[in-house]
């Protein structure tokens, strides 16, 4: 990733008028590198090399500010990098803000009425989503992920926490449009959101369990992080140690390598080992 050069893009611009070529070529290149990152089995390589790619994506977006695909790629990568590799709270807030900004810009380009409603009341925002279609799911899902990541990075800000309800209706809409998108990822996000509060304070742990189980079913259990998140956010929430340990042991026994999921599965196994080591203390 660090050694990637872009002379071909300059040459193509000289040969053919640039605008159409850059739109397709840079987007395809960004997608290809994103896929390479997902298939990496050494998280340290990604941690150390990804910043160079993020800077490259920034440059591509600066040159193509109207490319929804590039904006969403930038948002997804900034959000994933911040969530997986950044421990410093100030830096996490900065990167999560960049992720949300890119996703919001893409939303405003593709769905201007939803963009406008996102700044207002929950009922108006919910109503605006009724006119969205299956073809809109990528921008809605990426915006929801980025917004959730930004809220997490700003969890001490009650104004940020107040937006969680809007994030939840976004993921609910994604399920209506295509519950299988991103391997059932919207189910996982909703599973986490439904367990943020204990049942006595309005949490819905059993609803969360159904979301986690459906996501695991949709992904054919290939995404190991789903089981880790179910163990952490559901099993611990209801103090079910048997389920907690079983899920985590299944993650550790599974093969991490899978197309498009190797990196996340490798990280999932590291988290599973840590959670299991804490099991005696927690339960």
Image: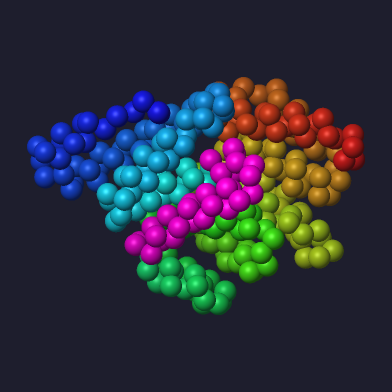
Q: Would you say residue 72 sits in the magenta stretch? A: no
At x 44% / y 60%, what residue is drawn? 104
Magenta: main secondary structure equals: helix
Position of residue 41 measured from the top left corner of the image (x, y, whole percent): 54, 23
Q: Is residue 126 above or below residue 240?
A: below
Which residues lie in the magenta part?
Answer: 81-110
The reply, left or right, for residue 175 in relation to residue 224 is: left
| Quarter of the rendering containing residue 235 | top right
Q: Is residue 71 above or below residue 27?
A: below
Position of residue 10 measured from the top left corner of the image (x, y, whole percent): 18, 36
Q: Would you say residue 100 sits in the magenta stretch? A: yes
Position of residue 80 measured from the top left corner of the image (x, y, whole percent): 53, 42
Q: Is residue 194 among what the camera can see?
A: yes
| Quarter of the rendering containing residue 53 | top left
Q: Is residue 100 above or below residue 46?
A: below
**The C terminus lies in which quarter of the figure?**
top right
Q: Is residue 3 above or below residue 235?
A: above
Q: Nearer the viewer, residue 200 or 37?
A: 37
Q: Nearer the viewer, residue 58 or 259?
A: 58
At x 15% / y 34%, what residue is drawn? 11
> What is the number of callouts on the image?
0
């Amino acid at each position: 990733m660090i050694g990637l050069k872009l002379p071909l893009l300059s040459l193509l611009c000289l040969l053919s008028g640039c605008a159409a070529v850059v739109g397709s070529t840079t987007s395809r290149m960004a997608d290809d590198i994103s896929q390479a990152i997902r298939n990496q089995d050494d998280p340290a390589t990604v941690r150390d090399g990804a910043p160079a790619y993020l800077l490259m994506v920034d440059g591509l977006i600066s040159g193509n500010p109207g490319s929804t695909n590039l904006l969403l790629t930038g948002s997804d990568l900034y959000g994933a990098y911040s969530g997986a590799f950044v421990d410093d709270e100030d830096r996490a807030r900065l990167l999560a803000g960049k992720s949300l900004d890119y996703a919001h810009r893409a939303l405003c380009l593709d769905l201007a009425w939803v963009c406008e409603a996102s700044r207002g009341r929950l009922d108006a925002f919910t109503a605006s989503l009724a006119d969205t279609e299956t073809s809109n799911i990528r921008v809605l899902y990426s915006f929801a992920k980025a917004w959730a990541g930004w809220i997490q990075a700003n969890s001490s800000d009650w104004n940020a926490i107040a937006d969680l309800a809007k994030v939840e209706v976004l993921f609910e809409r994604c399920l209506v449009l295509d519950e299988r998108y991103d391997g059932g990822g919207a189910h996982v996000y909703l599973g986490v959101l439904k367990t943020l509060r204990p049942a006595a304070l309005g949490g819905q742990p059993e609803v969360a369990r159904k979301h986690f189980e459906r996501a695991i079913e949709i992904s054919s259990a290939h995404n190991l992080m789903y089981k880790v998140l179910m163990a952490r956010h559901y099993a611990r929430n209801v103090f079910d140690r048997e389920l907690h340990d079983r899920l985590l042991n299944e993650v550790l026994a599974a093969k991490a390598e899978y197309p498009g999921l190797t990196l996340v599965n490798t990280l999932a196994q590291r988290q599973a080992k840590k959670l299991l080591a804490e099991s005696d203390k927690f339960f």
